[in-house]
């Protein structure tokens, strides 16, 4: 075996070993997996938000903030509606316990709409007191 062939083979084996070791998993020590006592999220936007009123949101920046700071009847998880403020949901022929929604026709994606920021519930007293202000 020539020296050139030996060095090439050695370099290839070393490269493969380093590549495979980089793909391995690293176990964290148990004390590293604990969360810090105070959790902080810093959110940066490219533009100023126009409103935090979910009924008046018109642009995506405000909608993102409202969606992350508030919750609707449903929340969307992996494109599927999950209960948010709604503790349960039963569809019946004669109407639900607190909230009744009547649709002109069946709408299979209705819960997905209710998880969108534009359909978040409003506090009746606040709306009556402040209106559009």
Image: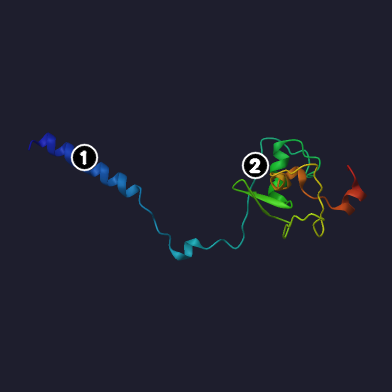
Q: Is residue 49 above or below residue 23?
A: above
Q: Does the CB distance between marks 2 and 1 fall below 8 Å?
A: no
| Relative horizontal placement of residue 10, taking residue 60 as reference (left or right) | left
Q: Nearer the viewer, residue 11 or 62?
A: 62
Separation of residues labelled 2 and 1 (CA atoms): 46 Å
Q: Secondary structure under badge 2?
A: loop
Residue depicted at x 66% and y 35%: 46
Q: Quadrant of the N terminus?
A: top left
Quadrant in the picture for residue 59: top right
Q: Which residue is mark 2?
A: 44
Residue depicted at x 61% and y 45%: 79
Residue depicted at x 23% and y 44%: 14
**What is the x, y in percent for residue 26?**
39, 56
Q: Secondary structure under badge 1?
A: helix
| Relative horizontal placement of residue 126, taking residue 29 as reference (left or right) | right
- Crowding at dot 2, Cα within 10 Å, few <14 / some 14-19 / many 20+, comes out as few
Mark 2 vs 1, N-terminal side: 1
**What is the x, y in percent for residue 123?**
84, 53
Q: Is residue 129 above or below residue 57?
A: below
Q: Which residue is mark 1?
A: 11
Q: Quadrant of the C terminus?
A: top right
Quadrant in the picture for residue 89: bottom right
């Amino acid at each position: 075996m020539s020296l050139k062939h030996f060095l090439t083979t050695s370099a290839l084996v070393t490269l493969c070993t380093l590549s495979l070791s980089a793909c391995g998993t690293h176990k964290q020590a148990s004390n590293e997996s604990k969360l810090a006592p105070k959790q902080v999220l810093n959110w940066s936007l490219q533009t100023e938000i126009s409103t935090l009123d979910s009924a008046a949101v018109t642009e995506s920046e405000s909608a993102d903030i409202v969606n992350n700071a508030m919750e609707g009847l449903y929340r969307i998880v992996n494109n599927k509606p999950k209960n948010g403020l709604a503790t349960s949901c039963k569809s019946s022929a004669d109407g639900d316990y607190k909230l009744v929604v009547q649709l002109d026709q069946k709408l299979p994606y209705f819960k997905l709409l209710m998880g969108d920021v534009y359909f978040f519930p409003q506090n009746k007293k606040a709306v009556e007191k402040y209106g559009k202000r």
